[in-house]
Amino acid sequence: MYICQWSLEIVFGKQKQALDIMKEWGAEKFRSSRFARSKNRVYVGHIGESPSLIIDEYEFEHIEDFTVALTEMGQPQFKKYSDAIAPFIVPASQKWKVFRIIS
């Protein structure tokens, strides 16, 4: 099992707009990509982390499903979501972290 976390910082005051876009984007991911093989949760900073921090987390059984899912994000139906959220992301703040579950 693998936990794959996409973390990003959002411009101050734009958390709701970014989360709304991510919700729609997530629904499309589960309709038309290998992200459908994962479990998902989204959380934000609260105590000790900025509320501008958003983590979009996926749990995959196989790492290959994650790598295919990322590749599929280049399909045309996903472009509108990445374009919509781009103005809200603090430059250079987004990254993926992948963890292997051992117990």
Image (cartoon, rainbow, N blue to C red):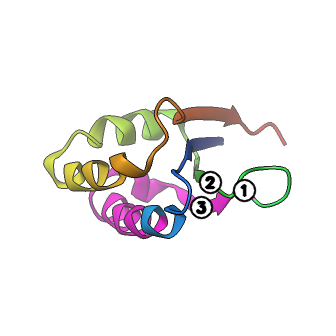
Please say if 47 is above or below 63.
below
Residue 4 on image: x %, y %: 59, 41
Per the image, the residue denoted by label 1 is 45
Q: Are marks 1 and 3 in contact (CB under 8 Å)?
A: no
Q: Of residues 85 and 33, which is closer to you in this image?
A: 85
> Magenta region, mostly helix, strand or loop?
helix
The residue indicated by pointer 3 is: 42
Local SS, label 3: strand
Answer with left or right where residue 33 lies relative to residue 77. Answer: right
Q: Nearer the viewer, residue 8 or 60?
A: 8
Closer to viewer: mark 2 or mark 1:
2
* First reached walking from the N terminus: tag 2 or tag 3: 3
- The N terminus sits in image quarter: top right
The percent position of residue 57, horizontal first and vertical second, equals 59, 51
Which three-letter amino acid code belongs to the residue tagged 2? Ser
Give the residue pinned by disc 2.
Answer: 52
Q: CA distance from mark 1 to mark 3?
A: 11 Å
Magenta range is: 19-45
Q: Is residue 57 above or below residue 19?
A: above
Q: Quadrant location of the C terminus?
A: top right
